[in-house]
Every structure is written in structure tokens, then in C-alpha cells.
Image (cartoon, grey):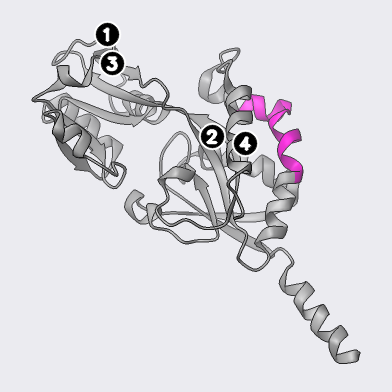
Amino acid sequence: MALLACCLAVSGRAAEAPATIVFQSTDTPPLWSPSLPDDGVGGAILRLLSANAGVAYALEYLPVKRFRQSRAPYIVGDPDILVHKRPRAVLPIGIFRSAFFFYRPHHDIHALPGIRALRGWTLGVLRGTLENPAYFLSNGLQVEESDSIESLLRMLKRGRIDVCILVDAAGQYMIKRLFPDEQDRFAAIPIPGSERPLALMIDVSQPGARAVAERYRGALRRTLESRQYARILEGLYGKGRMPPDLPRLLQRFGRAYATEQER
């Protein structure tokens, strides 16, 4: 009996949450970045949620291509960008959208054209983000990859590419930073149906990870409904300009991933 009790005690300790966990992310300001206060908007939300959940954490940043291949137990970002499927608890904490970006002096675009209208153009994307370029190639577009949002926007301005796909908030942020006097020369046209969640992804097959997921899950609702959460988003969207569909989208993604997670 003493040996059995000892084994159960050791097993219980192994299943406890680790003292400090490390989330992996990508440098995508203003959502995630080590150069911003609180690691950006997503980082500020993670900090608030972690405080409410009583979880100590750190953030590690990877290039997009390495991030997509990550098998780490703790990850933040878009769940669908990850290549390796794991039994993950997925907890949405925010929403982002993608957009086509143009440089008006080259292409004065005011509405999203059909893909066939872009035949002969060059499309810029971040390296590692475009899983299947065949769709664009089959419609007459060339695809050029780059390692940073900054380089894509500079290529856009120089005419080396005709259009690029970026996270809307990230593209807008970088335009303000790089070209503060030329913001009106860039056009961003949101892509319909491109809404994706910013989410915590926790591999519950790892020791102690299920306990971490439960801590976060227990604090999620009150965090997303708190005034502190609203203030963080006001820093991104502006006061009184939070997307009206945000609560609905968070609920939708939460339900969708609840049916898939931890398998």
C-alpha cells in the first residue's frame, strides 16, 4: 500500500501545471511583437488572461516557416497555420482579418477585383504562409515570397510586386511606421470571410498541460467580458470602434474548436 501511495503521489505531481510555461509565437506587430509594450495586443490579452488564470508564462518568437512546423506544447496564433496536428485545447482570445494591399500610384484599386482580373500580376506573401500557390498560379498570377511585412510593403511601393496579402492590422501598422506621410497611397481591401482567431493552443498530451488548459479555460469568459479586455482592444481599433461582430466570432470559433480539441 505504501508503494502504491508513493506512485500515485508522483503521478499526481507530474500532472500538475509547470511553474512557468513558454508560448511560441511570430513577430507580427501590432498583434505579437517583442518590440512592443506587453508584446503587442495579443500579448496584452495573454498577460491579462494569464493573471486571471494564475499562470506564469514567457513568449518565444519564431520565423513563420519554423512556427508553422512547431510541435511545442504551448503556442499562440492562428490554429490553422500549424502543420502538425496535436490533441490541442484551442482557446480563442481575439480575431484578425486578412487583406489585399495595393499601392495606389501603381494600381488605384477601390474594390476587390475577381482573381481573373489580376492575371499577369505578381502577388507577394510572407514566406511559409501560402500553403498552396497552385490556385494563384493557375489563374495567371506569379507568387513571390518574402521574409517580412516591411520588405513586402517596400516591394509594393517599388512596383516589384502588384499586390500582397497581409494580416490587415499588421499591414496597416507597418504602413504607418514606414510611410507616415504616404498612408493614403496604400489601399487595404479586407478579404471577405478571412476572419481567423488569435488563440491559445495547448497540447494536452504533454505533462501538466491539461491542468494549464483548465486554468485558462476557467478564466477565459470573465477575461473576455472585462473592461480591461475592452481597453486593450481600444488601443488597436480606437475608442468605440471595436468590431461589432467580435463577440459573435469569438463564440463561433470557441464552439468550432471545442468540438475538435483534445482528440
Tell me the CA gap for discs 4 and 3: 32 Å
| Element assignment for label 1 | loop
Q: Is residue 36 left or right of residue 223?
A: left
* Disc with the residue nearer the chain's start (2 vs 3): 2
Graded by Cα atoms within 10 Å as few (under 14), some (14 to 19) or many (20 or more), the crowding at tag 4 reads some
| Element assignment for label 4 | helix
Tell me the CA gap for discs 4 and 1: 34 Å
- The residue range painted magenta reads 218-232
| Element assignment for label 2 | helix
Name the residue type under label 1.
Answer: His
Residue 219 among magenta residues: yes
Residue 166 among magenta residues: no
Q: Which residue is the site of mark 3?
A: 187
Question: Magenta stretch mostly in which secondary structure?
Answer: helix
Graded by Cα atoms within 10 Å as few (under 14), some (14 to 19) or many (20 or more), the crowding at tag 3 reads many
Tell me the CA gap for discs 2 and 3: 23 Å
Name the residue type under label 4.
Answer: Gly
Q: Which residue is the site of mark 2?
A: 41
* Disc with the residue nearer the chain's start (1 vs 2): 2
Q: Which residue is the site of mark 4?
A: 254
| Element assignment for label 3 | strand
Q: In this view, does 159 lie to the left or right of 92?
A: left
Residue 110: assigned label: 1
Name the residue type under label 2.
Answer: Val
